[in-house]
Image: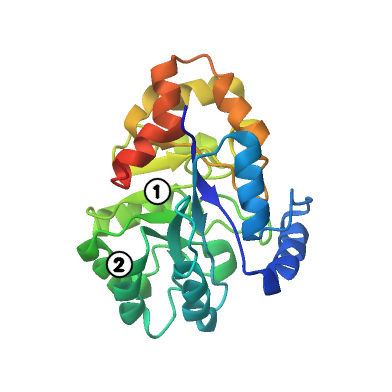
């Protein structure tokens, strides 16, 4: 069975060690590896992961172009490129044109970029993303490093209201540690894709099955959140679910292939 990891982090070697330290300090947990290309590919090979979405993040506006230049230069066909875009980067429109030509999607990280996703100042950027039809992967839920909720269900639904044509992928089963609220508002709404990264091991079993039974089976994506998450553990969590093999295939790769037109 093919496996597409829809939520992987990786950095250029010159900054990867600092990135690892920063993540460990922010999340108060050890990372599984230094997140560089070699280590990502080794972990993929070891655990049977076919392709990975590389979700790059620019914490500051002046990092956007440099990070994307590095991302666009990755040569492995096993990497699916989700570029970085900071909401307050002055040349966001120019960068969106570059992303459309060189990547398959965009990753937004409100926790590190310090903004609320329904901030009206960001609406012009969303409008162009909607026009260009670029999938948008959001970190969603409670922020471990700040205690804020900058991409919770309320903000997510406000983005939906104003931009119904955006392909919105809500990471962490729709909102890390906000799963009761997510269950009552986001789950079952066909507007939202959700990914499984950094979620299943934190959720109660009965709630996982309510999510899986209520949400569109074509809009659930497998993710590890590597190096925060562990490939083997996250894969086993899906394989051990009491759901049929067809549903597992959808989660592991079929839904991602359809979303990104990979086959």
Pointer 2 with pointer 1, Cβ within 8 A: no
User: Dot 2: within a 10 Å radius of its alpha carbon, few (fewer than 14), some, or many (20 or more) residues?
Assistant: some
Q: At 51% from the left edge and 45% from the top edge, which residue is drawn?
A: 175
Q: Can you identify the residue that label 2 sits on?
A: 100
Quadrant of the rendered image containing residue 10: bottom right
Q: How many discs mark residues in the rendered view?
A: 2
Secondary element type, mark 1: strand
The residue lying toward the viewer, choosing from 125 and 2, is 2
Mark number for residue 261?
none
Q: Please, is residue 72 above or below residue 47 in the view?
A: below
**Quadrant showing the C terminus:** top left
Q: Please, is residue 217 above or below residue 31 in the view?
A: above
Secondary element type, mark 2: helix
Q: Is residue 155 visible?
A: no
The residue lying toward the viewer, choosing from 29 and 226, is 226
Left or right of residue 85: residue 224: right
Left or right of residue 258: residue 235: right
Q: Please, is residue 256 above or below residue 127 in the view?
A: above
Q: Can you identify the residue that label 1 sits on?
A: 169
Colouring rule applied to residues: rainbow
The percent position of residue 120, horizontal first and vertical second, equals 34, 71
User: Dot 1: within a 10 Å radius of its alpha carbon, few (fewer than 14), some, or many (20 or more) residues?
Assistant: many
Left or right of residue 143: residue 61: left
The percent position of residue 59, horizontal first and vertical second, equals 57, 72
The percent position of residue 45, horizontal first and vertical second, equals 61, 41
Q: At 40% from the left edge and 48% from the top edge, which residue is drawn?
A: 169
Give the CA distance from mark 2 to mark 1. Answer: 17 Å
Decide which of tag 2 and tag 1 comes sooner along the chain.
Answer: 2
Q: At 47% from the left edge and 76% from the top edge, which residue is drawn?
A: 69
């Amino acid at each position: 069975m093919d496996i597409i990891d829809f939520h992987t982090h990786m950095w250029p070697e010159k900054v990867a060690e600092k990135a690892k330290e920063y993540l460990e300090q922010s999340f108060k947990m050890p990372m599984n590896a230094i997140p560089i290309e070699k280590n990502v590919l080794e972990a993929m090979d070891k655990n049977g992961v076919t392709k990975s979405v590389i979700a790059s993040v620019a914490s500051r506006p002046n990092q956007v172009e440099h990070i994307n230049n590095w991302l666009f230069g990755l040569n492995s066909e096993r990497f699916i490129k989700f570029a970085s875009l900071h909401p307050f980067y002055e040349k966001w429109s120019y960068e969106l044109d570059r992303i459309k030509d060189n990547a398959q999607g965009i990753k937004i990280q409100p926790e590190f970029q310090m903004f609320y996703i329904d901030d009206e100042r960001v609406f012009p950027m969303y409008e162009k993303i909607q026009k260009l039809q670029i999938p948008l992967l959001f970190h969603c839920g409670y922020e471990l490093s700040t205690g804020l909720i900058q991409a919770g269900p309320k903000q997510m639904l406000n983005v939906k209201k104003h931009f119904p044509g955006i392909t919105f992928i809500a990471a962490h089963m729709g909102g890390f540690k906000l799963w009761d609220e997510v269950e009552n508002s986001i789950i079952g709404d066909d507007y939202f894709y959700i990914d499984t990264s950094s979620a299943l091991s934190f959720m109660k079993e009965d709630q996982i099955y309510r999510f899986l039974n209520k949400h569109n089976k074509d809009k659930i994506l497998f993710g590890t959140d590597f190096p925060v998450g562990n490939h083997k553990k996250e894969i086993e969590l899906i394989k051990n679910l009491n759901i049929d093999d067809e549903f597992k295939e959808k989660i592991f790769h079929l839904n991602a292939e359809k979303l990104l037109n990979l086959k």
